[in-house]
């Protein structure tokens, strides 16, 4: 991946952290001893990405380098190492589809196919409408409810072709459905409902 | 000190040594790509695998500390298989394009594939391809060949101190690049070409020029600055094609500056290859040696000795200066000078004009103050040593002069000479740091010494050195940093005004007033030649630079790579530069020109060969007897106490790439200059 394909061609002229970000930056840096502030580089990259519609412009990398007293190259290295950092703009809904073995066995190929059918994008691409971007990722750590599609910060679980389609349509209408298992299971309880601790009271669904 | 057994041989190594070093100690050769003595250990190529008793699998010897009682085998069947495996993996994505690769014939990968490679690949898939990266005018990249040893990244970060190189992406997607493909902004950048074990980083100016086995190799000395880096000059036929560093732990270790390496294309351009004489029409016309000599002799006969002067340039060998000095002694003129820039150095006391601490001594220094110098461009390789010293010991370093980026933190004390006064009198806070230090150093550059108040600066430096105890039985912390390769030899030879003689400024101002009728420039181009409009000027040298343009007679000389010549580096170390090619056309060695000319004016110099000349030179100036050695100088008083001026202190040089006739003629240096300026204005624009 050359630098040209890695980072966005069109870059904003300026980047400045907003107030909320500044607060988080302070917290992130304070976690590390004096002189070790460079350890906060991932946190700062994450904060920048969060503030800037899910991607990190070059100016933000340079700003972070300045704040942490690091070489710009070192920050770019970190930012390019993790697939979780975007160096190019992504759609409003950033889809990360897991393709690792458990998800694959449970039908992640169908999820991918649905995304392709509906939005005509493959991994690394943004849809024509500009609203969706897709990245195929490795295990998201939620294999029990495989297959998983992460939309921005939220997980949608137990997907199949139809459920993915419904999800995408809801997102298109900007009314995201409840997060979690689309089958409605709680946490990672067995399909068809709990088999033990039945007497325990269910806590309400998240969100 | 751990003792271990390598292939049945017992060896004892230093504490902290690695298994790889122990193996070498035992005479076992360990193949490697990422490991390099002068860089941090990365342990990422896995080529150096060895077997260790009780270890479940082969270990990377470069990253394994040697321990007492280890039993190592470097020759077992398992080691061989493991290395073959590593090699096979390395070659999976390597293009195997040796026939069109400039590294061919001197490639570690090629060599080691002979030992550990298969004859055919088992890999059927497509190889990965990586786009080229822009790294500036010197480094050509073919990144598909890169094996990700990260030597280049570690060099630029650790040694050069410019963290512009890095590895982006991860896993199979890793690529080496500069930050946003900017030019690698270091005066040492091209050393990554030597470090790269494959053909990923090769020399751009030398691309597709020659194969290593066609070249004649000559061990010589670099004269692009005054450090005297040891180099190897590679020539084919009569063309100098490249310069590589030669190991010398006390001077350049194994690095050289980009100018030392790449200014050589200047040897092919704008050369003076015939004698010239300015005709009636005011233009230079080629003439025979005899006519040129006759013209000079005629003019000299008409001129009184007191109206004749000689100025020696910055890249002249000691022999030529000795010959010219002898000639002027015979003629009877005291107006000779080798200090083109007007540095207020005297030739009397050797400790007053050399780098007494020595370059290797920097490794022990524990506080440094730099005055009127930018060591990063005046002696880049030495600057890397200061940087290393800083990294190892965080010593305090201060600087009097303009704000500079020296690749290590420096406290700028301002650009006012009054600061030096305060330092010398012990009033300045930094004086306390120097006093506290056991081995403090002061480095004075030409920016401080070429000023009108240069002698006062010298006196202050002397006072400072004595005041903070810089000079002890085993330490001398007073250092002058020259950037002219010929300067120390010139001072050693006493190529300075004799009794009643004028220095360069005196000569030039006398010339403008019409009081100097005849000036002999021996390779002297760093002068205000407009001031030489009136006198008859002889320019003896190798390039049609400033000096030749104002000359009435031009005598073509050999450049440094075209003759054997002695140079004294700023430490006072005498070294021999050797001939790698012959001078072009009618050009001759400078000493021989002077010897031949002396006959035409019946002042025949008393040597008939270079050897005789050297014998006489050694008899007069004994330092030239010992080659390659440091000859400590006796500490004595120098400088003249006076009030210093308030004008701001400058650095010795403010530009790196085009500082001499050769580097100004070099196209490569011109490109570097432009890239550097572009980089600077990009930063300024932000
Ligand atoms: S470019 Fe050369 S030196 Fe740099 S990582 Fe690649 S192989 Fe190593
Ligand atoms: S494999 Fe998909 S979440 Fe673990
Ligand atoms: S030389 Fe030991 S891992 Fe590269």
Image (cartoon, rainbow, N blue to C red):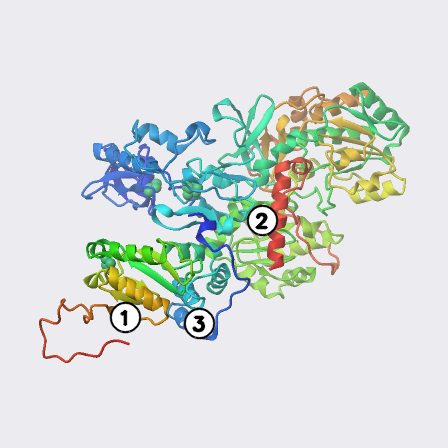
Label 2: chain letter: B
Local packing at callout 2 (Cα closer than 10 Å; few below 14, some 14-19, many 20+) is: many
Q: Position of residue B611 (x, y in %)?
A: 64, 22
**Which image quarter: residue A34?**
bottom left
**Residue that appears at 31% across and 56% down:** A137
Q: In the depicted view, which residue is nearer to us: B505 or B682? A: B682
Query: Which structural element holds mark 2?
Result: helix
Q: Position of residue A97 (x, y in %)?
A: 30, 58
Q: Which residue is mark 1?
A: A179
Q: In 3D space, how far apart are the residues under numbered discs 1 and 2 (Cα atoms)? A: 59 Å
- Residue B416 disc label: none
Q: Which residue is mark 2?
A: B376
B345 sits left or right of A202 in the view: right
**Which image quarter: residue B230?**
top right
Query: Which structural element holds mark 3?
Result: helix
Do discs 1 and 3 share a chain? yes
* Relative height, residue B396 to residue B106 (above, below): below
Q: In 3D space, how far apart are the residues under numbered discs 3 and 2 (Cα atoms)? A: 39 Å
């Amino acid at each position: 991946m050359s630098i040209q394909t890695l980072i966005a061609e069109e870059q904003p002229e300026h980047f400045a952290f907003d107030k909320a970000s500044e607060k988080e930056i302070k917290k992130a840096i304070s976690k590390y001893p004096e002189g070790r502030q460079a350890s906060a580089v991932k946190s700062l990259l994450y904060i920048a990405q969060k503030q800037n519609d899910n991607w990190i412009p070059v100016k933000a990398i340079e700003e972070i380098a300045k704040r942490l007293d690091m070489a710009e190259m070192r920050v770019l290295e970190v930012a390019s190492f993790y697939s979780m950092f975007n160096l190019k703009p992504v759609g409003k809904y950033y889809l990360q589809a897991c393709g690792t073995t458990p998800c694959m066995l449970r039908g992640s190929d169908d999820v991918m196919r649905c995304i392709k059918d509906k939005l005509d994008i493959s991994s690394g691409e943004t849809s024509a409408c500009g609203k969706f971007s897709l990245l195929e990722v490795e295990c998201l750590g939620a294999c029990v409810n495989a297959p998983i599609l992460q939309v921005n910060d939220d997980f949608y679980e137990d997907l199949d072709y139809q459920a993915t389609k419904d999800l995408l349509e809801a997102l298109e209408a900007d009314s995201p459905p409840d997060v979690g298992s689309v089958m409605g299971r709680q946490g990672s309880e067995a399909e068809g409902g709990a088999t033990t601790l039945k007497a325990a009271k269910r806590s309400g669904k998240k969100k | 000190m751990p003792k271990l057994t390598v292939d049945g041989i017992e060896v004892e190594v230093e504490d902290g040594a690695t298994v790889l070093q122990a193996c070498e100690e035992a005479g076992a050769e360990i193949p490697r790509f990422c490991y390099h003595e002068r860089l941090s250990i990365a342990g990422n190529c896995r080529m150096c695998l060895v077997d260790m008793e009780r270890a479940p699998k082969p270990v990377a010897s470069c990253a394994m500390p040697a321990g007492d009682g280890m039993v190592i085998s470097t020759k077992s069947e398992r080691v061989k298989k493991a290395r073959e495996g590593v090699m096979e993996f390395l070659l999976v994505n390597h293009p195997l394009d040796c026939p069109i690769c400039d590294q061919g014939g001197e490639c570690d990968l090629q060599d080691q594939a002979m030992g550990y490679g298969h004859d055919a690949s088992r890999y059927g898939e497509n190889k990965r391809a990586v786009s080229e990266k822009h790294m500036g005018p010197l480094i050509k990249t073919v990144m598909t060949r890169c094996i990700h040893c990260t030597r280049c990244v570690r060099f630029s970060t650790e040694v050069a101190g410019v963290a512009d190189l890095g590895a982006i992406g991860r896993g199979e997607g890793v690529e080496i690049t500069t930050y946003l493909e900017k030019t690698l902004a270091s005066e040492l950048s091209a050393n990554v070409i030597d470090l790269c074990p494959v053909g990923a980083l090769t020399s751009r100016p030398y691309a597709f020029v020659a194969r290593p086995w066609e070249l004649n190799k000559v061990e010589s000395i670099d004269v692009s600055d005054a450090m005297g880096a040891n180099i190897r000059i590679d020539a084919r036929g009569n063309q100098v094609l490249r310069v590589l560093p030669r190991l010398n732990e006390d001077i350049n270790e194994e690095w050289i500056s980009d100018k030392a390496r790449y200014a050589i294309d200047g040897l092919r351009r704008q050369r003076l290859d015939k004698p010239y004489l300015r005709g009636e029409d005011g233009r230079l016309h080629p003439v025979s040696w005899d006519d040129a000599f006759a013209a000079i002799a005629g003019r000299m006969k008409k001129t009184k000795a007191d109206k004749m002067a000689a100025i020696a340039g910055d890249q002249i060998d000691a022999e030529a200066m000795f010959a010219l000095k002898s000639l002027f002694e015979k003629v009877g003129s005291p107006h000779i000078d080798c200090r083109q820039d007007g540095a207020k150095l005297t030739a009397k006391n050797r400790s007053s004009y050399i780098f007494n601490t020595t370059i290797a001594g920097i490794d022990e220094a524990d506080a440094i103050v730099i005055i009127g110098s930018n060591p990063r461009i005046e002696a880049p390789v030495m600057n890397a040593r200061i940087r290393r010293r800083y990294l190892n010991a965080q010593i305090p370093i201060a600087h009097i002069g303009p704000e500079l980026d020296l690749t290590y933190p420096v406290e700028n004390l301002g650009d006012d000479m009054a600061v030096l006064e305060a330092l010398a009198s012990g009033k300045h806070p930094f004086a306390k740091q120097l006093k506290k230090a056991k081995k403090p150093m002061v480095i004075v550059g030409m920016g401080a010494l070429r000023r009108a108040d240069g002698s006062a600066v010298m006196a202050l430096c002397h006072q400072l050195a004595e005041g903070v105890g810089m000079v002890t039985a085993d330490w001398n912390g007073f250092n002058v940093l020259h950037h002219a390769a010929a300067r120390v030899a010139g001072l050693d030879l006493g190529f300075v005004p004799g009794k009643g003689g004028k220095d360069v400024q005196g000569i030039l101002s006398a010339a403008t007033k019409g009081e100097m009728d005849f000036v002999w420039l021996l390779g002297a181009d760093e002068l205000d030649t407009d001031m030489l409009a009136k006198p008859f000027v002889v320019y003896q040298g190798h390039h049609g630079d400033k000096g030749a343009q104002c000359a009435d007679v031009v005598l073509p000389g050999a450049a440094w790579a075209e003759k054997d010549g002695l140079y004294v580096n700023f430490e006072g170390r005498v070294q021999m530069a050797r001939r790698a090619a012959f001078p072009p056309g009618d050009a001759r060695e400078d000493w021989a020109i002077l010897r031949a000319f002396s006959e035409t004016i019946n002042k025949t110099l008393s040597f008939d060969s270079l050897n005789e000349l050297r014998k006489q030179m050694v008899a007069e100036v004994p330092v030239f007897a010992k080659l390659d050695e440091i000859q400590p100088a006796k500490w004595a008083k120098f400088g003249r106490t006076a009030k210093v001026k308030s004008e701001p202190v400058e650095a010795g040089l403010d530009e790196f790439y085009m500082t001499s006739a050769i580097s100004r003629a070099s196209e490569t240096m011109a490109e570097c200059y432009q890239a550097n300026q572009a980089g600077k204005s990009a930063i300024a624009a932000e």
